[in-house]
Amino acid sequence: MAKDLYDDVVCTALIQDGWKITDDPLILKIGRGSVFVDLGAEKLIAAERGSDKIAIEIKSFLSPSPINDLATA
């Protein structure tokens, strides 16, 4: 999968905020198919509470038409 322009910046920001990147890309199984999300990350909250998990889709809006970029995303 091609990486977006901001993938490295987003990864760095997440790591600096205490998140651990767990999947790059994150593959979610849905029925017989799969969905690819740019990143999966988790952050330890407390040993007895477990962790929060997030899925992150990164997109750049670089074309002359932000509306077209939004539709494409």
Image: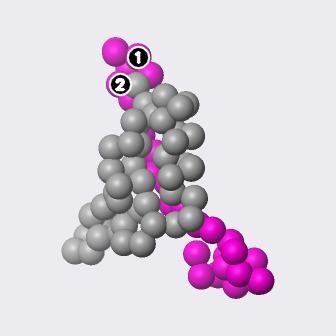
Q: What is the three-letter code of the residue carrying label 2? A: Gly
Q: Position of residue 57 (x, y in %)?
A: 51, 60
Would you call the spot at circle 2 few (<14 residues within 10 Å), some (14-19), or many (20 or more)?
few
Left or right, 6 with reference to 37:
right
**Most foreground residue, 73 or 64:** 64
Residue 52 is drawn in which quadrant?
top left
Q: Where is residue 46 in the image (x, y as percent from the top left)?
A: 41, 16
Q: Residue 15: which disc?
A: none
Vertical side of 39 occupied by 71: above or below: below
Q: Say what secondary structure mark 2 lies in.
A: strand
Q: Which residue is drawn at 52% across and 66% down?
A: 4
Vertical side of 72 occupied by 35: above or below: above
The residue identified by callout 2 is 50
**Res. 52 in view:** no
Residue with the most extreme left position: 32
Would you call the spot at circle 1 few (<14 residues within 10 Å), some (14-19), or many (20 or more)?
few
Q: What is the three-letter code of the residue carrying label 1? A: Ala
How far is disc 1 from disc 2 in space, using C-alphas?
A: 6 Å
Which part of the image, by quadrant, shows the N terminus? bottom left
Q: Position of residue 2 (x, y in %)?
A: 42, 72
CB-based contact (under 8 Å), mark 1 and mark 2: yes
Q: Say what secondary structure mark 1 lies in.
A: strand
Indicate whether residue 11 is drawn in magenta: no
Q: What residue range appears in magenta? A: 45-73
**Res. 17 in view:** yes
Q: Which residue is drawn at 44% across and 22% down?
A: 45
**Most foreground residue, 27 or 49:** 27
Which part of the image, by quadrant, shows the C terminus? bottom right
The residue identified by callout 1 is 46
